[in-house]
Image (cartoon, grey):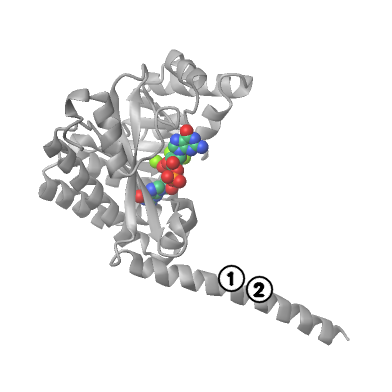
Amino acid sequence: RAKEAGKNTYQFFDAQMNAQTFERLLMESGLRQALERQEFELHYQPQLSCDGQRLEGVEALLRWRHPQLGLVPPGRFIPLAEETGLIKPIGAWVLREACHQMVAWDKMGLCVPRLAVNLSARQFEQQTLLNEVNDVLAVTGLAASRLELEITESMLMHNPQEAVSLLRELKALGVKLSIDDFGTGYSSLSTLKRYPLDYLKVDRSFVEGLPDDEDSAAITEAIIAMARKLKFTVIAEGVETAAQSVFLANAGCAILQGYYYSRPLPVAQLQQWLAARQPALAEIVR
Ligand code: C2E
Ligand code: MG
Ligand code: MG
Ligand code: MG
């Protein structure tokens, strides 16, 4: 009978749902406790000048050191953190932790010129962001111009009016602003020009095909040329090869970030990476 079959299908679906719901609940409760259990850590990825010689800054990238799952990358828990609103306290922690780290490096004599922190949509909507940024700068004493906040195109599209005023207020504090993953959304450079942004990060998907894929090459060159005319400083992400870095430098990209230079590193390893480039400092990190 149809009713029988329907019932079986329903039961099967139900069991699957339960497993999914269970896993979600497990992740969610874990995520809820992760902050107080101090399971989050930040890794830092260097950004270099286009000749590969000078450190321009680092990007803070969040990881969750889960007792059973090991090191969980952000792609696996940030969507859930956003859905549940947990991203707000987590995002606030990231900002505080990373700024404190910058000041600690200053004290060690390790020169990290600039820090980039990723913001989530939920964090960007709230007015408390201004207070959080203001507070962390006051508490740490970090110069505002050394802090760069990364936002994405979709955060601007959602409520352009509100976004403009929030960005203006952030700029008034002295922080730098960048658009992350440019090219993956639907905004044009002319739309972006309405916002007070300093940096434009070309998405990894364009860099991937360089230098051989003709379309990637043409698009990347065009983005960089236009962005420069509009006074953005261009950063390329996902640089994995020497050939890509040469192509990007020739195309006018100012800053390069990617595995070719370094993966995102835990604090101790980043310090070693820095010291290896400033031999006089090798003693400090030992
Ligand atoms: P994103 O901001 O675009 O960060 C760049 C991602 O590309 C990082 O992945 C980085 O590890 C990876 N990557 C860097 N260089 C290369 C390369 O040469 N090749 C390849 N294949 N990958 C490279 P990760 O750390 O897994 O972060 C993924 C995304 O999670 C980030 O993308 C960002 O959107 C988000 N995220 C990370 N940390 C935070 C955070 O603290 N807050 C928020 N809201 N989002 C974060
Ligand atoms: Mg980013
Ligand atoms: Mg990015
Ligand atoms: Mg990206």
Residue visible at 41% across and 72% down in the picture: 29
Residue 130's mark? Answer: none
Give the percent coordinates (x, y) of residue 71.
Answer: 43, 54
Is 208 left or right of 145, judged from the image as shown? Answer: right
**Label 1: which secondary element:** helix
Q: Is residue 75 above or below residue 242?
A: below
Give the percent coordinates (x, y) of residue 135.
Answer: 15, 52
Residue 187 visible? The answer is: no
Residue, disc 2: 16
Residue 275 visible? The answer is: yes
Badge 1 density bin: few <14, some 14–19, many ≥20, Cα 10 Å:
few
Along the viewing direction, whichever of 82 and 53 lies nearer the viewer: 53
**Quarter location, residue 126:** bottom left
Give the percent coordinates (x, y) of residue 244.
Answer: 50, 21
Q: Is mark 2 within 8 Å of ligand 1?
A: no
Give the position of the C terminus as an image quadrant: top left
Residue, disc 1: 20
Q: Check disc 2 and give the amino acid type.
A: Gln
Q: Is residue 137 above or below residue 274?
A: below
**Quarter location, residue 101:** top left
Q: Check disc 1 and give the amino acid type.
A: Gln
Q: Are marks 1 and 2 in contact (CB under 8 Å)?
A: yes
**Label 2: which secondary element:** helix
